[in-house]
Amino acid sequence: AVLLDQSNFKSICHDIAFISDSPGVQLENRQVYRHIEKFLDQATSEVVGESPYFVLRSDGMNLLDQISKKGIQQTYLTNSLRSTDAFYTVSAMIAAINDLQNAGVKVQLYNGQKPENLNQLSIGTSERWGIHSKRAVVDKKHILIGTYNVDPRSANLNSEVLIICRNNPELATHMIKSIQSRIAHSWPLFDVASPI
């Protein structure tokens, strides 16, 4: 399905950066993860993010743990088995459930329902909706949007790109509302009644 955003929201980023991995899997080519890591480490109050997958390497888990220890609230939205057929990524995320809970990281699982306030141009037959955005808002004013899935493949193999827009609270608020509209159709990972 193709979504048509009827809000006509527009914003200009006056402080923007574009980061790209170079082709090849060598560590020195992996620029996107390093910039995400650095940016999140500079957070002072809150991180709200969305990724279709949420499978962390040990360094990623350590980063989220360090962020939590600084008192920074973290909320991440990802797919559940009801919103993706990539069961292997959901299984891999579940393996880290204790580490995520111990770190105080809030993970929400999308339930596969159509988001509200969206017009749909039907080009398929599936009734299941999933999330595919890779984005985050830091401290309600900095925005990260790119191709980086939170998973080892993006961290280790793929050549990814990232756009960082700094100091744009208006765009940040719009993006948080968009993520929250999907969180409204999700379950907390740590709820024992949550249907993974």
Image (spheres, rainbow, N blue to C red):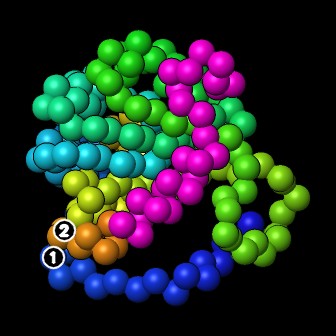
Read off the residue under disc 1.
Answer: 15
At 41% from the left and 86% from the top, the residue drawn is: 10
Task: Report the span colored magenta.
Answer: 173-196
Res 162 visible: no
Mark 2: which secondary structure? loop
Q: CA distance from mark 2 to mark 1?
A: 5 Å
The reply to whether the C-beta atoms of the residues labelled 2 and 1 are less than 8 Å apart is yes
Q: Earlier in the sequence, mark 2 or mark 1?
A: 1
Does the stretch in magenta take in 159? no
Q: Position of residue 31 (x, y in %)?
A: 20, 52
Q: Quick check: 70 left or right of 157?
A: left
Q: Position of residue 141 (x, y in %)?
A: 23, 64
Read off the residue under disc 2.
Answer: 166
At 45% from the left and 49% from the top, the residue drawn is: 50
Q: Residues within 10 Å of mark 1 (few under 14, many from 20)?
A: few
Does the stretch in magenta take in 183? yes
At 64% from the left and 46% from the top, the residue drawn is: 185
At 67% from the left and 62% from the top, the residue drawn is: 116
The amino acid pointed to by label 1 is: Asp
Q: Position of residue 187 (x, y in %)?
A: 60, 34
Of all residues shown, which one is farthest toward the right?
125
